């Protein structure tokens, strides 16, 4: 597992990404992080949009620059992370700096913990000293992952629909 690495989206990994995408779609679960819900039918265009977002190019109103990485292991996309470079009000309440997801067949193998650890190293490079990471209150696996990476719980946020979002801060200056 330690050989898993973060890779920027690349058209060279189309087959690997499509396998990841179709497995998640078939699961019927909510697609997290939000960038994996992007329709990959025009794969090259989707990849370019992800790379442009990192540079702040053609962002939708209210969006902030963000970096997307694929967690790759042996040419297989295991997970995806979306790292927001700054916090808008919405992100401060319920989105956080980092959103990540592991493909259903690769869960409970330690990949989420590794993905978050690697993501914290990336966000540290952006100058973020305290990263906000959130999860739904029912998502005990995500909460354990955040705590294992040094998460310090803050006040919960209650969304309009009553959903409870647990908020955690992680100090990146304490990361190796």
Image: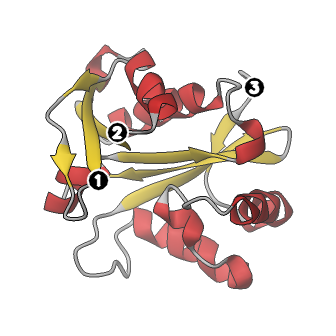
Q: Is residue 54 above or below residue 76?
A: below
Asked where in the image residue 58 lies, by quadrant, the reply is bottom left
- Marks 2/3: CA–CA distance: 31 Å
Q: Residue at x 58, y 64 (%)?
A: 36
Q: Residue at x 26, y 31 (%)?
A: 168
The label nearer to you, 2 versus 3, is 2
Query: Does residue 41 appear to the left or right of 118 in the view shown?
Result: right
Earlier-in-chain disc, 2 versus 3: 3
Say what secondary structure mark 1 lies in.
Answer: loop
Query: Does residue 138 appear to the left or right of 44 in the view shown?
Result: left
- At label 1, counting other C-alpha atoms closer than 10 Å, the crowd grade (few under 14, some 14-19, many 20 or more) is few
Q: Looking at the rendered structure, which numbered label has been put on residue 163?
A: 1
Q: Mark 2 — residue?
A: 137
Rendered-image quadrant of the C terminus = top left
Q: Mark 3 — residue?
A: 3
Spot occupied by residue 15 in the image (x, y as percentages of width and height): 85, 64
Asked where in the image residue 60 lies, by quadrant, the reply is bottom left
Spot occupied by residue 80 in the image (x, y as percentages of width and height): 59, 50
Residues under numbered marks 2 and 1 in contact, where contact means CB atoms less than 8 Å apart: yes
Query: Does residue 122 appear to the left or right of 106 in the view shown?
Result: left
Front residue of this view, candidates 7 and 97: 97
Residue 127 visible within the image: no
- Marks 2/1: CA–CA distance: 8 Å
Query: Does residue 91 appear to the left or right of 148 in the view shown?
Result: left
- Marks 1/3: CA–CA distance: 36 Å
Rendered-image quadrant of the N terminus = top right
Earlier-in-chain disc, 1 versus 3: 3
The label nearer to you, 1 versus 3, is 1
């Amino acid at each position: 597992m330690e050989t898993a690495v973060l890779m920027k989206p690349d058209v060279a990994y189309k087959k690997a990404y499509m396998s990841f995408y179709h497995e998640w779609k078939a699961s019927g679960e909510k697609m997290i992080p939000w960038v994996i819900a992007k329709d990959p039918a025009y794969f090259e265009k989707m990849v370019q949009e992800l790379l442009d977002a990192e540079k702040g190019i053609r962002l939708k109103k209210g969006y902030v620059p963000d970096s997307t990485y694929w967690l790759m292991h042996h040419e297989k996309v295991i997970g995806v992370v979306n790292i927001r470079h700054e916090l808008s009000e919405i992100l401060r309440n319920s989105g956080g700096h980092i959103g990540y997801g592991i493909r259903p067949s690769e869960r409970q193998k330690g990949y989420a913990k590794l993905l978050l650890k690697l993501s914290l190293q990336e966000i540290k490079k952006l100058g973020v000293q305290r990263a906000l990471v959130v999860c739904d209150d029912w998502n005990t696996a995500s909460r354990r992952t955040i705590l294992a990476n040094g998460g310090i719980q803050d006040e919960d946020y209650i969304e309009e629909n009553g959903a409870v979002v647990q908020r955690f801060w992680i100090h990146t200056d304490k990361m190796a």
